[in-house]
Amino acid sequence: MVKRVIVITGTPCVGKTTIARLLAHKINASYINLTELAVKEGIILGVDEKRGSMIVDEEKMKKRIKEIVESATEENIVVDGHYAQHVVPDEITMHVLVLRRDPEELQKLMIKAGYSGNKLWENLAAEILDVCLVEALHAYSKDKICELNVTSRSPEDVVNEILEVIKGSRKCSIGIVDWLGKLEMEGKLEEYLKI
Ligand SMILES: Nc1ncnc2c1ncn2[C@@H]1O[C@H](COP(=O)(O)OP(=O)(O)O)[C@@H](O)[C@H]1O
Ligand SMILES: [Mg+2]
């Protein structure tokens, strides 16, 4: 059976898990959450004390992802994680959805999720500077990558758009947001890029 891997990436709190779970449910797909997998199977090299985050063993994770995809009974596999582009190889990937959210809205969701201080500003800067998109462009052929602006949208609405992309009835595009330009125009760039 040919497997279809769909990668959902984006800055923490952008809405990946909400979207990926709903999508997996709608298309009867296996769902892999990279953070949960790393913790459950101990695929970690250590802890980044400064950031308060895990350092994932990317080589081991790559192998494990391939194994899981090969042995999956479902045709579709949704992989959810902000570093998916480092561990899900191009050759097994069909679609890469990079979720984007307006930094001001993202900041509110991050605060709600308990982010503060450096970790908050670092992750907001990553969103403003298109880090996940740039990484995805390094890892995958461009025609697989689809950037979706999820700002102020319901998960259902976003998932419906992803379903159209999978069906081939909607063309993907990249370069659809310009948070840097938007914040600069509003005179808020310095407030946001203060790391
Ligand atoms: N479309 C949405 N609209 C409003 N809030 C959302 C939306 N999607 C997710 N959220 C909320 O944002 C927070 C982060 O979502 P989550 O899916 O966990 O993001 P991620 O997996 O990217 O870190 C959660 O509190 C979630 O309920
Ligand atoms: Mg998540």
Image: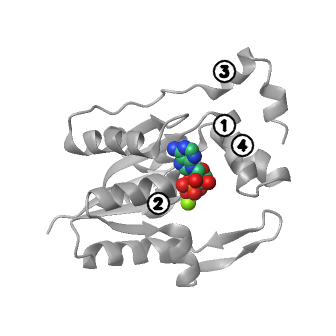
| Residue at the extreme left | 1
Q: Which mark sits nearer the N-terminus, 4 or 3?
A: 4
Q: Which residue is mark 2?
A: 80
**Residue in the picture at 49% in, 55% down:** 18
Kind of residue at badge 3: Lys
Q: Which mark sits nearer the N-terminus, 1 or 3?
A: 1
- Disc 1, disc 2: CB below 8 Å? no
Q: Along the horizontal axis of the image, is 1 left or right of 58?
A: left
Percent x, y of residue 17:
50, 58
Mark 3 CB near ligand 1 (8 Å cut): no
- Disc 3, disc 2: CB below 8 Å? no
**In the image, which is nearer the foreground, mark 4 or mark 3?**
4
Q: CA distance from mark 4 to mark 1?
A: 5 Å
**Residue in the picture at 72% in, 42% down:** 107
Q: CA distance from mark 4 to mark 3?
A: 17 Å
Q: CA distance from mark 1 to mark 3?
A: 13 Å
Mark 2 CB near ligand 2 (8 Å cut): yes
Q: Along the horizontal axis of the image, is 50 left or right of 96?
A: right
**In the image, which is nearer the foreground, mark 2 or mark 4?**
4
Q: Which mark sits nearer the N-terminus, 1 or 2?
A: 2
Q: Which residue is mark 4?
A: 108
The circle on residue 182 is 3
Q: Along the horizontal axis of the image, is 128 left or right of 132?
A: right
**Residue in the picture at 23% in, 70% down:** 74
The circle on residue 105 is 1
